[in-house]
Amino acid sequence: MYFCSSYNNNLMSQRTKIKALLQTEDTGFEVTVKGWVRTFRNNQFIALNDGSTNNNLQIVVALDSFDDETLKRITTGAAISVTGEVVPSLGKGQKVEVKAKTLEILGDCDPTTYPIQPKKHSLEFLRDNAHLRFRTNTFGAVFRVRNSLSFAVHQFFQERGFVYLHTPVITASDAEGAGETFRVTTLDPIKPPLTETGEVDFKQDFFGKATNLTVSGQLEGELGAMALSDIYTFGPTFRAENSNTTRHLAEFWMIEPEMAFYNLNDNMDLAEALLKYVIAYALKHNADDIEFLKDRLLEEEKQKPQQDRSELNLLEKLQFCLDNDFERLTYTEAIDILKESNHNKKKKFQYLIEGWGTDLQSEHERYLVEKHFKKPVILTDYPKEIKAFYMRQNDDGKTVRAMDILFPGIGEIVGGSQREERLDKLEQRMNEMGIPTEELWWYLDTRRFGACEHAGFGLGFERLVLFVTGMGNIRDVIPFPRAPKTAEF
RNA sequence: UCCUGAGUAGCUCAGCCGGUUAGAGCAUCUGACUGUUAAUCAGAGGGUCGCUGGUUCGAGCCCAGCCUCAGGAGCCA
């Protein structure tokens, strides 16, 4: 792996990555490049891409230097290896190009059956061909940005002394109520063992109890934070909800930091800093990709009526997010703003705001973020009835120390809270909400032994990638999307 | 799961009031051209009109059921 590093100074006799080559100012030396043919124009010019960058390298095939047999095999999608001299380009689209001296077809690509053609494809078509969509400009850019964001998340936390804690994928607790779970079992699906009362006997299952895929690593994360101070998880999470939207997946990646001795304000500060850090990182390290995605989005928005187009382009939107503080207000303040808004008075909301206590609909969140404040918004102190059992209760007896970060075009990107550290209050709330305290004895132990103020949040990674890439459908920002009726690749 | 819309060539789409042999652009193939940038020009091939049933002299078009996809909603991250 390492001997073909693109950053190797010795460009001779080894494979050079196209990104590194396009960054060099020098010419007049020989390189070997390998990649996949994007187009072959005029029987003379190969646009070669190796995935290291969105930009293609132009290979010039001199007249009569290769036999017709070889030239015919240079088709869109074919894998080739080229050795030749790096020279200043005579054409206009690029600074340097490679004059091919030797050219080897590594893998043929039959153009009559290859689904990816040198033309525009719809995102829906590429979703059906998710195994090949990496070879397009758009998905190349998306997944390089995804990679950068992922790395930046780790760097952000590591710089601050957080411990990356691996929480289990298979769990026995279904207590959080974060959604429908996928069952994990080795029992015979046709004839499972039954108890005397006729129910499936999970005592005979692999783990000796009913188990499922995790819906959140938070509860385990809290256990870590109660000793290591600051931890974060970053791993796959599973929800068996029958959600068919552009913002939901059955398998998605979540980042869940959990911090001892943090209150809700510290929690918000950290979340805002994280989001700004990773966005800035991607802007710096994926400038070409984001530039391409910006143009892609502009092109796509040309199809829409003027009023539906964004005021800012993708770059401006990301920069704006870095340059401005997120707007922080309580649920109660948000309800007042919504209630007094012309939008509500003119009955333009499908669900009119009438009183305090109900959850906000996505149209309300969008109004606050996109129309009223026009920037990311952090809502805090929600009614306890619409939030999870573990959130710290305020003294008013009505609200909890919750916070949701709402992003334009995405909706809720972060959900978090200060946790209830008082055993009696926590148990009381669990009883009210019908959460079995005996099943979560290990969780409650953190409140029995050395409890302290602590807080945390969950960041939906794909929603972050959606925001940074400007893509419209969450299935286009994860390599192999898992959603209802969708598990092909 | 609910609402709305869609499914016609490899892809993106057109197809009138139900009526003759279902069209276009791109892609592909063949040929030309040799400094092209999604190259260009000329020609050619390419169809189980999502599936099943029904109405009709006749269905891509009308009706019913089913499947799939997209957008919106709910649930949420």
Image (spheres, rainbow, N blue to C red):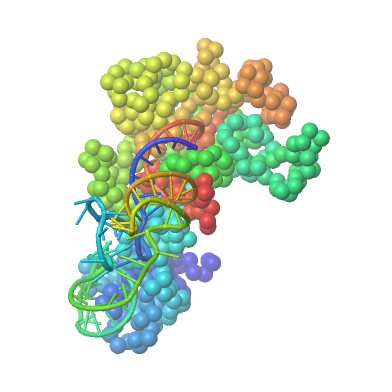
Q: Position of residue A284 (x, y in %)?
A: 37, 49
The residue lying toward the viewer, choosing from A74 and A233, is: A74
Query: Left or right: A172 with respect to A13?
Result: right
Q: Position of residue A54 (x, y in %)?
A: 36, 60
Q: Position of residue A396 (x, y in %)?
A: 52, 11
Query: Left or right: A140 with respect to A174?
Result: left
The residue lying toward the viewer, choosing from A68 and A157, is: A68
Rendered image quadrant of residue A46: bottom left
- Look at 57% across and 41% down and name the residue there: A240
Rendered image quadrant of residue A377: top left
Q: Taking A394 as reference, is A450 above or below it?
A: below
The residue lying toward the viewer, choosing from A76 and B28, is: B28
* Residue A222 seen in this snapshot: no
Q: Position of residue A78 (x, y in %)?
A: 41, 73
Q: Taking A402 as reference, is A458 above or below it?
A: below
* Residue A334 seen in this snapshot: yes
* Image mark count: 0
- Look at 80% across and 37% down and name the residue there: A195
- Look at 69% across and 38% down and name the residue there: A172
- Look at 50% across and 44% down and name the residue there: A249
Query: Left or right: A461 with respect to A279?
Result: right
The residue lying toward the viewer, choosing from A29 and A135, is: A135
Rendered image quadrant of residue B57: bottom left
Q: Taking A319 as reference, is B27 above or below it?
A: below
